Image (spheres, helix red, strand yellow):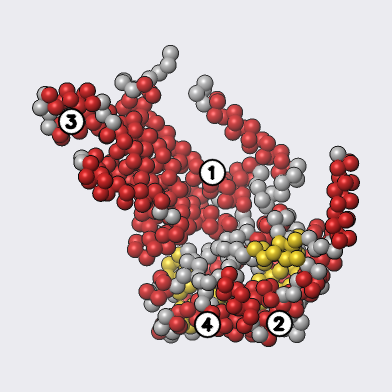
């Protein structure tokens, strides 16, 4: 047994010496679209990395995947990461693409609603009930007067058919679709109720970070460069992503890439602060999603 | 006791192995929950789970009943002539291959959120085995007996009720056994999209990374499937005991 292990060790060392980078998997939680633009634009090879991007879909458990080691890096949201940590899944945030949470509730503009509370006064709300902000809304306003139904993902057909129908959305995605379909909408960002977690966050498991800190640093550097490039000129990456995900047309790619820019731009792309994490941890503890608060410093690394 | 002991042994062995594996840390608890954690989730959320279970059971039962009635009726119709069978049977196969997860959002548009969508989903996935098995049963009546009925001038209706249908019962019941489990799956898939019941509990628990609660709900869903299966077996024993080899008690 010992022999085999040392033999493998020699092989690994030999491979490393060859300079051939080991394949790294980056698990996305959705199909290739502008929210991942920088990851597709990143010059991984320049940083000595060989990265394979694994597109996901609805409910891809990226946080469990990086915990279990079926991907080295993954895209998660900050609240998901805090909850995972409280359950013993030692994952750490490295780079937060969206500095402000792009999630919101959209309603028909013809209803003349002025606040998120108004949305909950009548009609139907399609929302993932398990999400923390759904429960913050419930706590704050109650769901007694609105019929809560499961979120249809990115599908807006029920919304278009029913004026009293509101649904959770990415503020730069579904509202654009609705306007294209000729329906004017009002969008209420969830950040308005004080819930503003980092989203589209690059994360990895802590044991792996410890084992190879240089690789994580190289990854973050490549991703930061990728996002800079994508924000400056999304065109080439968009056409590549459009090939991978033809269901989203080229015009929408361009439009979304433009609309999301203000959520991403930051003096230092991807940077996170302990204050923001502390606020989030406090909110999740209040909701009972985590049994007790945890140190913010454990949740992220600045690389 | 002798009857219940054999299935209990694998249950205990598997549960204990899972418990030990998770407790020892070989598999992290956020991937597979310890059986004790699942039991605790069952107890802690018993009111919520009981209410969800009631809704899912109702939807699965209604969907199953509908597919039994409709499925048998369609099979009788198909068995009446080769021409009808050739014309319509291929379309029955549609129900077997329909990817329910893909059309479930459409069901919401047709039937609205809630019970009707869930029942429709349970119905769609469970009807095909009823049609296929009933049809096979109706078409494999002993030719000698059929000749006998014809010889005595029995009408097609009498032949159906007195001969072909009873002779097809073993196959029909096999179809119902398969359909019962599918009806539960169909109901849960419908609930993912239509809201309510165990499907909704699973959806919410998954978002909250509560693996223990997901498994608790899944456990209840299997219990429901098992109960339906047991019901069919009971009917099977009562109707077939006197004449069919599959239910004859071996002494």
Q: Nearer the viewer, residue B13 or B155?
A: B155
Indicate the secondary structure of the residue bearing disc 1. Answer: helix
Is the residue A99 above or below the residue B190 in the image? below
Indicate the secondary structure of the residue bearing disc 3. Answer: helix
Mark whose residue sits in front, 1 or 4: 4
What residue is shown with label 4? Answer: A251
Crowding at dot 1, Cα within 10 Å, few <14 / some 14-19 / many 20+, comes out as some
For the N terminus of chain A, the quadrant is: top right
Q: Identify the subunit bearing mark 2.
A: A
Please report whichever mark, 1 or 3, sits nearer to the chain's N-terminal start. Answer: 3
What residue is shown with label 1? Answer: B219
Indicate the secondary structure of the residue bearing disc 4. Answer: helix
Task: Tell me: A226 left or right of B88.
Answer: right
Measure the C-alpha gap from mark 1 to mark 3. Answer: 44 Å
Q: Nearer the viewer, residue A53 or A243?
A: A243
Q: Same chain for the residues at labels 3 and 2, yes or no?
A: no
Q: Position of residue B13 (x, y in %)?
A: 64, 32
Specify the label residue B138 is tagged with.
none
The quadrant where residue B37 appears: top right
Mark whose residue sits in front, 4 or 3: 4
Measure the C-alpha gap from mark 2 to mark 4. Answer: 19 Å
Crowding at dot 4, Cα within 10 Å, few <14 / some 14-19 / many 20+, comes out as few
Measure the C-alpha gap from mark 4 to mark 3. Answer: 66 Å
Q: Is residue A87 visible?
A: no
Q: Residue at x 27, y 34 (%)?
A: B139
Q: Residue at x 34, y 63 (%)?
A: B110
What residue is shown with label 2? Answer: A229
What residue is shown with label 3? Answer: B159
């Amino acid at each position: 047994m010992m022999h085999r292990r040392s033999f493998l060790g020699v092989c690994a060392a030999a491979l490393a010496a060859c300079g051939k980078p080991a394949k790294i998997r980056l698990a996305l939680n959705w199909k290739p679209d502008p929210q991942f633009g920088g990851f597709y634009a990143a010059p991984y090879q320049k940083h000595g990395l060989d990265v394979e991007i694994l597109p996901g879909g609805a409910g891809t458990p990226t946080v469990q995947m990086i915990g279990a080691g079926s991907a080295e890096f993954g895209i998660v949201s900050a609240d998901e990461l805090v909850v995972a940590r409280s359950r013993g899944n030692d994952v750490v945030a490295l780079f937060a693409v969206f500095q402000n949470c792009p999630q919101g509730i959209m309603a028909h503009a013809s209803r003349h609603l002025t606040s998120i509370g108004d949305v909950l006064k009548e009609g139907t709300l399609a929302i993932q009930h398990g999400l923390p902000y759904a429960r913050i809304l419930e706590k704050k306003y109650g769901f007694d007067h609105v019929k809560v139904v499961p979120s249809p993902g990115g599908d807006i057909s029920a919304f278009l058919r029913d004026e009293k129908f509101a649904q959770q959305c990415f503020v730069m995605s579904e509202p654009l679709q609705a306007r294209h379909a000729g329906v004017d909408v009002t969008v209420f960002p969830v950040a308005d109720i004080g819930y503003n977690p980092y989203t589209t966050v690059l994360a990895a498991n802590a044991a792996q970070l410890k084992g190879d800190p240089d690789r994580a640093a190289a990854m973050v550097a490549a991703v930061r460069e990728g996002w800079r490039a994508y924000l400056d000129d999304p065109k080439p990456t968009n056409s590549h992503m459009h090939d991978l995900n033809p269901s989203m047309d080229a015009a929408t790619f361009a439009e979304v890439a433009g609309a999301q820019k203000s959520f991403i731009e930051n003096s230092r792309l991807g940077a996170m602060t302990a204050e923001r994490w502390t606020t989030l941890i406090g909110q999740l503890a209040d909701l009972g999603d985590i049994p007790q608060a945890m140190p913010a410093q454990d949740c992220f690394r600045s690389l | 006791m002798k009857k219940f002991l054999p299935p209990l042994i694998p249950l205990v062995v598997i549960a204990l192995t899972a418990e030990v594996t998770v407790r020892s840390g070989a598999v992290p608890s956020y991937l597979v929950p310890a059986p004790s954690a699942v039991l605790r989730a069952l107890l802690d959320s018993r009111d919520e789970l009981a209410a969800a279970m009631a809704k899912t059971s109702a939807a699965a039962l209604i969907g199953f009943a509908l597919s039994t009635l409709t499925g048998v009726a369609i099979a009788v119709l198909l068995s009446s002539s080769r021409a009808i069978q050739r014309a319509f049977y291929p379309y029955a196969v549609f129900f077997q291959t329909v990817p329910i997860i893909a059309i479930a959002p459409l069901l919401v548009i047709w039937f609205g959120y809630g019970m009707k969508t869930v029942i429709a989903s349970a119905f769609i996935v469970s009807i095909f085995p009823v049609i296929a098995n009933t049809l096979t049963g109706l078409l494999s009546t002993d030719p000698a007996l059929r000749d006998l009925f014809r010889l005595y001038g029995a009408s097609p209706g009498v032949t159906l009720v007195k001969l072909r249908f009873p002779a097809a019962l073993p196959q029909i019941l096999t179809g119902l056994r398969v359909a019962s489990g599918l009806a539960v799956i169909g109901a849960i898939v419908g609930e993912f999209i239509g809201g309510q019941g165990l499907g909704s509990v699973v959806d919410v628990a998954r978002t909250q990374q509560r693996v223990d609660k997901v498994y608790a709900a899944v456990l209840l869903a299997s219990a429901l499937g098992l109960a339906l299966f047991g019901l069919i077996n009971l009917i099977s024993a009562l109707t077939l005991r006197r004449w069919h080899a599959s239910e004859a008690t071996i002494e």
